[in-house]
């Protein structure tokens, strides 16, 4: 009797949780549609407020960040526009529309910092890594793992020599691709966990040599610049520019991508 009551209670909780999740999804969809309608009517300020409220509530999606970036771009808030385009690109690295709008927004930034030159192999590697996000590479690794199992299953279960040959080489090829995919997945995961980037949102920021307002000035940067976050002390971030320069800025001067 006791076990039966527990089972019924679990089912009720499961149904309530599912209903709540569906209701939240429908509510979010209706809020997004309201913001989209405001954007279409050129009411970019109110649209941005609604999109931003969804972000602040913990909701995230490529469409949300992309639309929020477009709204901020229309409001000439280039730092916030680039921030949200970068967040959208993190979720969908291969999206051409996001890449185009991000490139357009970057033309409006003041700082034009040349990155340190990279060997062509590293450029190729970065392009390959940017094809999918972390979830995409996880799915790819899982698919090739299944292909290996299927190939060797056919090899051992089917007695036709020609089919066995195809299955064997398919399994070997899938194994090689799986190794590459798994390597990319590990690198992507490591970057997600250990490497953080940010975007300057204040019009002008004076980076310091050390995390202290009284320390010497290191360099001056401006709204929309993407920086690498290397450390943090109290209310300060240690940042690295694409050309290798290092300085410290207040956390309020930038947002983490």
Image (cartoon, grey):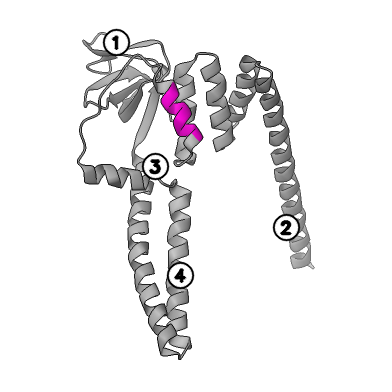
Report the Cα–Cα distance between label 3 and label 4.
27 Å
Q: Which residue: 73% across, 32% down?
A: 30
| Residue 23 on the magenta span | no
Question: Which-is-in-front pick, marks 3 and 4?
Answer: 4
Mark 4 neighbour density, 10 Å: few (under 14) some (14–19) many (20 or more): some
On residue 192, the disc is 3
Name the side, left or right, on which 194 lies relative to 34: left
CB atoms of marks 2 and 4 within 8 Å: no
Residue 147, disc = 4
Label for residue 213? 1
Residue name at image x 70 percent, y 36 percent = 29
Residues at marks 1 and 4, CA–CA distance in whole angstroms: 58 Å
The Cα atoms of the two marked residues, 2 and 3, are separated by 35 Å
- Furthest residue toward front: 162
Label 2, secondary structure: give it: helix
Where residue 33 sits, quadrant-wise, is top right
Q: Which comes sooner in the sequence, label 2 or label 4?
A: 2
**Element type at mark 4:** helix
Q: Secondary structure at mark 1?
A: loop
Between residues 56 and 124, which one lies in front from this camera angle? 124
CB under 8 Å between discs 1 and 3: no
Mark 3 crowd level (few <14, some 14–19, many ≥20, 10 Å Cα): few
- Name the residue tied to disc 2: 10
Query: Who comes first in sequence, dot 1 or dot 3?
Result: 3
Q: Position of residue 138 (x, y in %)?
A: 45, 55
| Left or right for 113, reference 202 | left
């Amino acid at each position: 009797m006791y076990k039966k009551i527990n089972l019924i209670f679990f089912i009720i909780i499961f149904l309530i949780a599912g209903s709540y999740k569906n209701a939240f999804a429908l509510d979010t969809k209706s809020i997004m549609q309201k913001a989209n309608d405001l954007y279409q009517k050129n009411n970019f300020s109110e649209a941005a407020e609604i999109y931003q409220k969804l972000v602040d509530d913990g909701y995230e999606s490529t469409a949300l960040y992309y639309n929020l970036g477009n709204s901020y771009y229309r409001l000439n808030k280039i730092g916030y526009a680039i921030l949200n385009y970068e967040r959208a690109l993190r979720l969908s690295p291969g999206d051409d529309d996001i890449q185009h709008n991000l490139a357009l927004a970057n033309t409006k930034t003041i700082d034009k910092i040349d990155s340190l030159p990279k060997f062509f192999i590293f450029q190729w590697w970065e392009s390959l890594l940017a094809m999918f996000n972390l979830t995409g590479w996880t799915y790819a690794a899982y698919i090739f793992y299944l292909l290996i199992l299927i190939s060797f299953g056919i090899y051992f279960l089917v007695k036709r020599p020609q089919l066995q040959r195809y299955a064997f080489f398919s399994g070997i090829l899938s194994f090689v691709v799986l190794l590459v995919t798994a390597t990319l997945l590990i690198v992507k995961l490591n970057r997600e966990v250990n490497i953080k980037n940010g975007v300057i949102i204040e019009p002008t920021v004076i980076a310091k040599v050390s995390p202290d307002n009284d320390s010497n000035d290191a360099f001056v940067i401006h709204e929309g610049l993407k920086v690498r976050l290397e450390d943090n002390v109290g209310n300060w971030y240690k940042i690295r520019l694409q050309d290798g320069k290092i300085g410290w800025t207040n956390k309020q001067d930038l947002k983490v991508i």
